[in-house]
Image: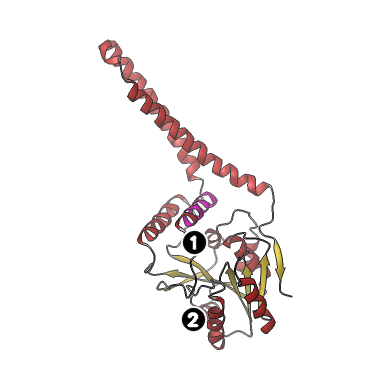
Amino acid sequence: MKLSLIVPCYNEAEVLPIFRKAVQDVRPQLRVDELEVVFVDDGSRDATLSILQQFNREDASLRYVSFSRNFGKEAAIYAGLQHAAGDLVCLMDADMQDPPSLLPEMVGACLDEGYDTVGTRRSTRSGEPPIRSFFARCFYRFINHISDTKLVDGARDYRLMRRPVVAAILAMPEYNRFSKGIFQWVGYKTKWLEYENVERAAGETKWSFWKLLKYSFEGIISFSTVPLALASFMGMLLCVIAMVTIVVLAVRHFLDPMTAVYGWTSLVCLIMFIGGVQLLCMGILGQYIAKAYLEVKKRPIYIVGGKSE
């Protein structure tokens, strides 16, 4: 039984030695014959790659894949899954917010309880900015209402998977990736482990509020077509409102012609409102067309700049 740990890295030079020691400490508790760690350097600009190369020289089981530039965490996840050779594959971050101490329990759930995948979720969001926590909860409630693929609130990318699950995910080579949705979409028997939020061991988070907001839009567009239906609904609603307004104004004109004279303010506001709705609907449609455009170009999800032997 071989276990592969996939660790996406972007400017994680400060925390990598801490992560390596934590994995070494938990290694005796893992009931596997072989352990490999596949680090994916996502075009880091600090000493991350140099540290990974040093790790590999000291221990051949600590492998690395380095991108030619920054392609994003989703590409790093996909690359890690492609390069992992284990019967069990675990995806985790290097910043220690995914505690390696949970690994023995995760492996046990697969080996003893027959689960195909073991996911983790935060039971609390302590230490996280309140505004960020609020919008995160709103996102999960919203997407679970509009999508058939249900996401677990607080779910992390930290999860252990059997080889068939990995193969199913790799069979989805879409360019616009939203792994949280993909993990749920493929199904399989899943166990969820809860733990309290853990602060980073070192360094700074690479996920700003705006990056998370953009990522949430990616998830909505990837796993729901409801926004398109909503745009159509708004168009029909405005048509109905316009027809009713025409009828009301016509009736008022015949009953009292003096009331048919209106100011420019109401007219301008009405034009701006309808124009805004039209632009919103065009924007929604444009997002879906843009995603389809990127898919049909068939560009690679990532480009490897170097890797361990």
For label 2, the SS is helix
Query: Does the magenta run of residues contain 221?
Result: yes
Residue type at numbered disc 2: Ser
Residue 209: x and y, percent?
45, 57
Residue tagged 2: 101
Question: Is 15 drawn above or below residue 75 in the view shown?
Answer: below
Say which residue appears at 55% left-offset and 40% top-offset: 286
Measure the C-alpha gap from mark 1 to mark 2: 24 Å
Segment tinted magenta in the rendering: 212-223
Choose mark 1 or mark 2, whichever is in front.
1
Residue 307: x and y, percent?
71, 71
Are there few (<14), some (14-19), or many (20+) residues within 10 Å of tag 1? few
Query: Does the magenta run of residues contain 151?
Result: no
Count all numbered tags in the image, as a single digit: 2
Are there few (<14), some (14-19), or many (20+) residues within 10 Å of tag 2? some
Q: Which corner quadrant holds the N terminus? A: bottom right
Q: Which residue reaches farthest right?
A: 309
The secondary structure that most of the magenta stretch takes on is helix
Answer with mark 1 or mark 2, whichever residue precedes in sequence.
2
Residue 253, quarter of the rendered image: top left
Residue tagged 1: 207
Question: Is 145 drawn above or below residue 41 in the view shown?
Answer: above
Front-lying residue, 41 or 161: 41
Residue 199, quarter of the rendered image: bottom left
Q: Are marks 1 and 2 in contact (CB under 8 Å)?
A: no
Q: Which residue reaches farthest front?
A: 46
Report if residue 171 is visible in the image.
yes
Residue 15: x and y, percent?
53, 75
Q: Which label belongs to residue 253?
A: none
Q: Which residue reaches farthest bottom?
A: 28
Residue 48, quarter of the rendered image: bottom right
Seen in the image, is 39 located left or right of residue 256? right
